[in-house]
Image (cartoon, rainbow, N blue to C red):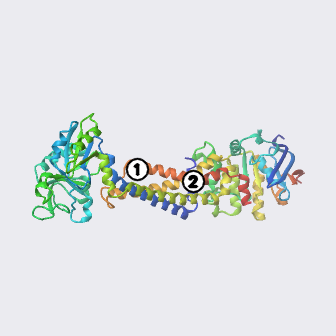
């Protein structure tokens, strides 16, 4: 299977005052297109940093990150912004919806960066909401939705511009078990039926079971475990 | 334009705070409109002054009269095309509070020749010239007091009693004049000098000031010097200046209105910047993670900067246009103070202030939003 994302010799070091903190250490990783990977590990092990590097939100101190053929580590901030808008969708633990906008307008946000007109944006947002099962809540504001529904809207926002890669940072961390399972099933559907490559950071072993394989991150290194 | 919905909804994120900020902008621009109109009224004469018109005053003070015999001698100065004169009458209609409408005894034909910008039908000018007790009034004054041609109106004098001791002068309104310059002030009344001079109890044969027009190509400064030299060492020496200088010195009698207006507006706008700057700072601080999300989904730094600046400008425009519009309506209605006028240049200046103040108030919060690190901002929430 072709690798959609490749990390080669990636190290990431942060400066915390006078102290240097090595978060990732000489990491090599290939993520095949259409894969669903869970990344687990203790706090501070570098899971979110890995996600940030794959999403072009951060750059490695050493090494290269290539996603969809684009070498992210050499791009400028503006180039990375444009790349993100076309190639990657983000799903966060706390949904991060804009409270002043309706579900529909939240989903339309990434499309504001395209040349689509208002009608086309609305149509595509409606399709995305339909995929996540919230077509009937398009006019609701986030405060009028449950946690699970908010996360579904966030997923719709992540897929509305049809990116190949979805990056999820603890997507079920703020939800009860049943709702978490619904969200994870939705992610599985997006992976299996819509061909999205998904990298999901989680602390939850049950959540990781929905993935094809799990990467264990510890002290800046990775070890792989295939799903049962 | 596609970001307008996002900007609009972000502005109304905290409705009460935004409403209060807009209210303070509203008050600032309402004051701007009203004070600008008052300031313009005081220096209005300067702005519409004709560069080729000179004013001859008594050298010591504007309140000291000049002999009417000077007219022929001024006319004889080479380069002088036409001369007339006017007096300050200082009366009021019905109540002293109506004294903001000035009255000037003048010579009808001469005066209208010197002031071609005053427009009045020829037959009304003739009717006035043929009626010793006739008067003509400016359109602003006629409108404010509800006067029409044919009305007979009493004016109570404060300086000039009549020979019979009466302070009441009655006039027939023979005409209503307007100015062809929209900035021109027409809240005054003109009546016949001959009648005034014969009927007044004192100061006969004297005028308040002379107005003259210089010939095309003549040097106004040389003519002004020639006139003043002619009356040197006489009991009534003269001081000749341009009409603009005269208007400015006349307005200065009331104090430095422009400075007072500028100081008040300066204080108002300084406060406004603090209030709206604080609103924008709070607004950005409260939605750090939301701005980080915008950047995460692909909004460039400059776009985020533009969005926050646009929010600030939008708040300023909402309050500013409401304030300016209300001020304009009050001025147009004449209910506040008749005769005020808000020139187009002031409206354009106000619009520039709105945009400028919006950019200034929003600049630091917008820069903060632009420089926001996505990772740090998202980590705050996590």
**Percent coordinates x, y for residue A214 in the rendering:** 86, 53
Q: Is residue A169 above or below residue A61?
A: below
For disc 2, the neighbor class at 10 Å (few under 14, some 14 to 19, many from 20) is many
Q: Nearer the viewer, residue A121 or A90?
A: A90
**Percent coordinates x, y for residue B101 in the rendering:** 25, 58
Q: Residue furthest top?
A: B217
The answer to whether A205 appears left or right of B156 in the picture is right
- 2 and 1 marks on the same chain: yes
Secondary structure found at label 1: helix
Residue assigned mark 1: B346
The answer to whether A195 appears left or right of B177 in the picture is right
**Percent coordinates x, y for residue A39 in the rendering:** 83, 53
Residue assigned mark 2: B362
For image coordinates 64% across by 55% down, the residue present is A135
For image coordinates 46% across by 50% down, the residue present is B351
Q: Is residue B266 above or below residue B302?
A: below
Q: Is residue B174 visible?
A: no
């Amino acid at each position: 299977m072709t690798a959609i994302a490749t990390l080669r010799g990636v190290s990431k070091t942060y400066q915390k005052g006078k102290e240097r903190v090595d978060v990732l250490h000489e990491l090599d990783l290939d993520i095949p297109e259409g894969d669903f990977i869970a990344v687990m590990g203790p706090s501070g092990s570098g899971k979110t940093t890995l996600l940030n590097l794959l999403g072009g939100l951060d750059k490695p101190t050493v090494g290269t990150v290539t996603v969809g053929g684009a070498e992210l580590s050499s791009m400028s901030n503006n180039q990375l912004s444009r790349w993100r808008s076309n190639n990657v969708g983000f799903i966060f633990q706390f949904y991060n919806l804009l409270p002043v906008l309706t579900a529909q307008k939240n989903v339309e946000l990434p499309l504001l960066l395209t040349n689509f007109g208002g009608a086309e944006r609305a149509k595509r947002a409606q399709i995305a909401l339909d995929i996540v099962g919230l077509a009937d809540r398009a006019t609701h504001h986030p405060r009028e939705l449950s946690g699970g529904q908010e996360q579904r809207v966030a997923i719709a926002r992540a897929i509305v511009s049809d990116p190949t890669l979805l990056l999820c940072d603890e997507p079920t961390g703020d939800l009860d078990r049943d709702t978490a399972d619904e969200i994870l099933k939705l992610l599985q559907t997006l992976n299996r039926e819509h061909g999205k490559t998904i990298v999901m950071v989680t602390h939850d072993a049950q959540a990781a079971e929905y993935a094809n394989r799990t990467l264990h991150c510890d002290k800046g290194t990775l070890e792989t475990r295939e799903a049962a | 334009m596609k970001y307008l919905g996002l900007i609009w909804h972000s502005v109304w994120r905290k409705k009460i705070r935004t409403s209060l900020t807009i209210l303070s902008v509203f008050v600032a621009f309402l004051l701007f409109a009203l004070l600008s109109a008052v300031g313009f009224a005081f220096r209005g004469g300067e702005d519409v002054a004709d560069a080729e018109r000179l004013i001859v005053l008594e050298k010591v003070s504007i309140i000291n009269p000049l002999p009417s015999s000077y007219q022929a001698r001024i006319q004889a100065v080479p380069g002088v095309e036409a001369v007339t004169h006017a007096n300050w009458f200082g009366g009021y209609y019905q109540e002293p509070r109506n004294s903001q409408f000035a009255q000037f005894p003048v010579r009808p034909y001469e005066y209208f020749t010197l002031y071609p910008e005053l427009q009045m039908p020829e037959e009304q000018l003739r009717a006035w010239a043929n009626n010793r007790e006739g008067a003509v009034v400016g359109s602003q004054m006629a409108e404010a007091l509800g006067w029409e041609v044919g009305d007979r109106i009493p004016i109570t004098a404060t300086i000039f009693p009549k020979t019979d001791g009466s302070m009441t002068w009655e006039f027939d309104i023979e005409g209503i004049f307007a100015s062809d310059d929209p900035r021109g002030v027409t809240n005054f009344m003109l009546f016949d000098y001959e009648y005034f001079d014969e009927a007044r109890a004192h100061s006969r044969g004297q005028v308040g000031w002379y107005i003259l027009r210089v010939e095309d190509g003549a040097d106004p400064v040389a003519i002004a010097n020639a006139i003043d030299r002619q009356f040197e060492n006489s009991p009534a020496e003269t001081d000749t200046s341009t009409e603009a200088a005269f208007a400015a010195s006349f307005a200065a009698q009331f104090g430095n209105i422009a400075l007072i207006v500028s100081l008040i507006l300066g204080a108002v706008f300084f406060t406004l910047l603090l209030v709206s700057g604080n609103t924008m700072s709070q607004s950005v601080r409260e939605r750090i993670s939301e701005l980080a999300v915008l950047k995460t989904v692909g909004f460039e730094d400059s776009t985020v900067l533009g969005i926050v600046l646009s929010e600030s400008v939008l708040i300023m425009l909402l309050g500013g246009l409401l304030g300016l519009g209300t001020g304009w309506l009050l001025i147009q209605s004449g209910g506040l103070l008749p005769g005020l006028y808000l020139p187009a240049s002031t409206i354009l200046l106000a619009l520039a202030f709105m945009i400028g103040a919006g950019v200034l108030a929003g600049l630091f919060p917008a820069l903060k939003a632009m420089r926001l690190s996505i990772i740090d901002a998202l980590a705050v929430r996590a």
